Amino acid sequence: MGLAERRAREKRQRREDILDAAKKIFSAKGFHGATVEEIAGEAELSPATLYLYFANKWELYASLNLRMLEFLCERIERVDREDGLDPLQKVRQMAEAMYDVYCFDPDILTNVLRMQASPYLEQLPDKMRDQVNAKVAQALRAFAKIFQKGVEQGYFPDFPPMALSDIIWSVFTGLVLLERSKNLFDSQKDYLKPTLFLAIEIMAQGMSSQGMRDYTQGLADHGPEHSPPKAT
Amino acid sequence: MGLAERRAREKRQRREDILDAAKKIFSAKGFHGATVEEIAGEAELSPATLYLYFANKWELYASLNLRMLEFLCERIERVDREDGLDPLQKVRQMAEAMYDVYCFDPDILTNVLRMQASPYLEQLPDKMRDQVNAKVAQALRAFAKIFQKGVEQGYFPDFPPMALSDIIWSVFTGLVLLERSKNLFDSQKDYLKPTLFLAIEIMAQGMSSQGMRDYTQGLADHGPEHSPPKAT
Amino acid sequence: MGLAERRAREKRQRREDILDAAKKIFSAKGFHGATVEEIAGEAELSPATLYLYFANKWELYASLNLRMLEFLCERIERVDREDGLDPLQKVRQMAEAMYDVYCFDPDILTNVLRMQASPYLEQLPDKMRDQVNAKVAQALRAFAKIFQKGVEQGYFPDFPPMALSDIIWSVFTGLVLLERSKNLFDSQKDYLKPTLFLAIEIMAQGMSSQGMRDYTQGLADHGPEHSPPKAT
Amino acid sequence: MGLAERRAREKRQRREDILDAAKKIFSAKGFHGATVEEIAGEAELSPATLYLYFANKWELYASLNLRMLEFLCERIERVDREDGLDPLQKVRQMAEAMYDVYCFDPDILTNVLRMQASPYLEQLPDKMRDQVNAKVAQALRAFAKIFQKGVEQGYFPDFPPMALSDIIWSVFTGLVLLERSKNLFDSQKDYLKPTLFLAIEIMAQGMSSQGMRDYTQGLADHGPEHSPPKAT
DNA sequence: GATGAATGAGTTTTCATTCAT
DNA sequence: TATGAATGAAAACTCATTCAT
């Protein structure tokens, strides 16, 4: 019936509203620093109402991160699936994808960072934690796959693709943190995008340069000191 | 007098003990998650005693970060002062320096990251905040100076040195976060060092490659879309 | 009209359903421990609907106890009215009656007990409280009346009949509590009945024994130290 | 040292104060009905301070009941150990003991009753629950032992001693409940003692009467319908 | 008449901080 | 100087009750 349907949609909308409010507050203050009351206030609800939609603070937090990770995975995997692009172009596309994710949800990314950087995960109910971990692993694997092809096709020297994808990921997350901190000093906006693209360009050039090939060769002669992490 | 001196030294030592304990707990649980009682316990003191050495939890936290930033600055500036190294070598040295900092204090770095990623700074007493901000800026300037010379001497294309140093900084901090999160899955150690050096090498190669020069030239022709952040 | 009548009957039925559900939950968890939502769920209703039938949680609780007390009174009074039984037989019948009440509603009795053992009564709206109090008094008076006749007819020594009835009542309620607690240890069932009858038999024998007569006489000589409670 | 000793004594005293306050409030309102704030207020402390002495509300409640049960056990067992008393005298002594317990702590007994009459026990931390259960069982066994001897020495007919002790226990607890409820109507005091003694006398007479012996014999001929509970 | 959704008023519990000793 | 004890303020979470539909 129309009524039940409307109800369901409204309910879903409320859930989203709460997630948006939570995103804002958690991003600003971290998990412990944010209070349920504040989040509820931001969503223009009473705290009690919030508990009708989420069992507790933890579940709210995890739902938030999950939403973001899903969006990220989807975008990365789409780049991998795209036809007619050489690996270098795909790496550039990846930067675009990451930036899009950031634009879609600039705050929540720092939440994921914080989550990864802390023992919060251990406190999550098992099911949620597994979901979050799986999503992070999935995103990193999607990353690695792009480099994998680049190595196979001879665009990049023979380096563990996981390491390469980790580096790109690191540039990105590191830049996000940096931009946040810079915003505290001056309030210069739109710093992330050009800097991210510059970084990607530098790395793309570096990876495909002759010097890099020589470096790789040197390592191969003396034995690798780099062991790639196993994806989980 | 000898006595007064000894007293002063003992006091300083106690302070250091507390900072060490605080480092451990804050790193593990974040600012809000850590309790003063826990920190005092780790330092084998009563909470009340802790307050004889630090005015409050915030000041303790900030002192911690300040200690770390000072160490970092010192190491970076030393690289800059060193003679007989070309810019590329200095960039590599910088990676060594950063890794040393990480080894000296693997936990505290995540604290600085967390601090930068949040509005904690705003809650600090004015004087402390200024000190922390100044130190961060100083570290980033020291970074930039190295690239500045590289650009001046024609090693690197004509890019805002601040952007270059930000990128290196980002790789590093991003990798630290990543390593932490990976440690949650498997417990593979010593991933940071080789990956960091690989990243630096790739970037060094990229920056000094002909392709990068062409890229820069292209940007210059179409007008720069990148405006460097002003250090504060 | 038939319609209005059906409506009324349905309404009464709903009320009973709710009372049954409430009985179950209150018995298991006590007044404060039970939640309206849980009771409504047990009755397969929404909490809001429950409030159409009872003004609030208190009234629901009191209605429950009232229902039980009415049933108890009715049974006791019937024993009193029965012809052709000597007082000893009536005491035995009373035990049967009490046991029937227990069987009719094993849970609710503990609710009355709990209610009697606490200041819940004071919080009831005046009208309800008066009703509950009146019913309890009525039950105890019906009890006492049986002993009254036993004393008048010389079956029992000259003791305050109220005290005698109080003792029987106490044995019963005490045994109910005890059975409940024993069920927590082992799950032995049907302990109450034989033990109750044994107790009644012992007391009946005791009251009609010569020893008791002597004991009573002794008290009378030294002045009574027992003053019966005034029924209200 | 004297200081440490004084500290320890003061601390123990505070604990007792809190237990006394808790006794009062729990008795009046039950577990769920009582609030920590109220208990703390009664003890003239802040709620936070209360948590320095007890981990949570449950532990406080359980400690209370344990204290009471220990006192009760001790008194009963002392009666059993006493020399030169025949079983009938011991039963009378037992009534004295129970009344003493009641005087020592008139409120807390209703707490134990409530606890036994509800599923609270299941929610206690395992260790505490075991302690409470063990104490209750111990008290009932001590009871039974007295009747055991009475049966062995031919004072009482051959009835399950556990059943006899359960009956006495029931009279007592039932009377306590009854007195409480009567206090709500009129505020007549000192009703419990004479009524309890009267009950005990009646039962003692009953058990040792010829009629009882006949009754027992009758049961024996037709097979026992009473199976004693196994103590745990 | 029935109910999904909302919430105000509590509840237990925690913790940074103070202070008498 | 050091600390055990105390607490105000706030946090997460619950629940009886209301009300628009």
Image (cartoon, coloured by chain):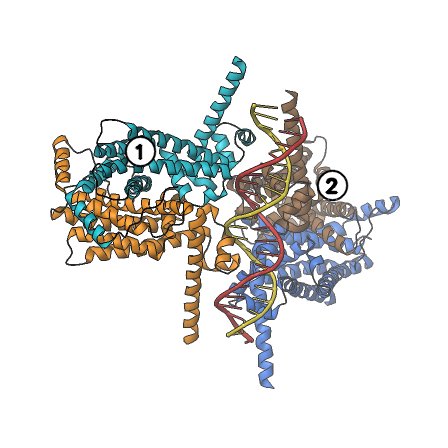
Chain colours: A brown, B blue, C cyan, D orange, E yellow, F red
Marks 1, 2 in one chain: no
Mark 2 crowdedness (10 Å alpha carbons): few <14, some 14-19, many ≥20: few
Residue A139 versus residue C77 in the image, above or below: below
**Up-down: is D90 above or below B68?**
above
Q: Between tags 1 and 2, which lies in front?
A: 1
| Residue D86 percent location from the top left of the image | 15, 53
Indicate which disc residue C29 carries.
none
SS label for mark 1: helix
Image quadrant for the N terminus of chain B? bottom right
Q: Is residue D202 above or below residue F20?
A: below
- The residue at 52%/67% (across/down) is B46
Dot 2 falls on a residue whose secondary structure is helix
**Residue C105: quadrant of the picture:** top left
- The residue most toward the top is C2
Give the left or right position of residue D101, taking residue B69 as reference: left
- Rendering quarter of residue A131: top right
Question: The disc labelled 2 sits on which kind of residue?
Answer: Cys
Figure quadrant of the C terminus of chain B? bottom right
| Residue C44 percent across, percent down from the top left | 49, 27
Q: Residue furthest bottom?
A: B1
Q: Is residue D125 left or right of residue A18?
A: left
Q: In this orientation, does residue B174 appear?
A: no
Position of residue A104 in the picture relative to residue A162 (left or right): right
Q: Which residue is mark 1?
A: C98
Residue underneath mark 2: A103
Give the amino acid type for the residue marked by disc 1 in the picture.
Met
Q: Nearer the viewer, residue D28 or B223?
A: D28
Choose top left, top right, bottom left or bottom right for residue D206: top left
Q: Chain of mark 1?
A: C
Which residue is nearer to you in this view: F13 or A154? F13
Q: Position of residue C146 (x, y in %)?
A: 28, 35
Residue drawn where x is 54% and y is 33% of the image: C55
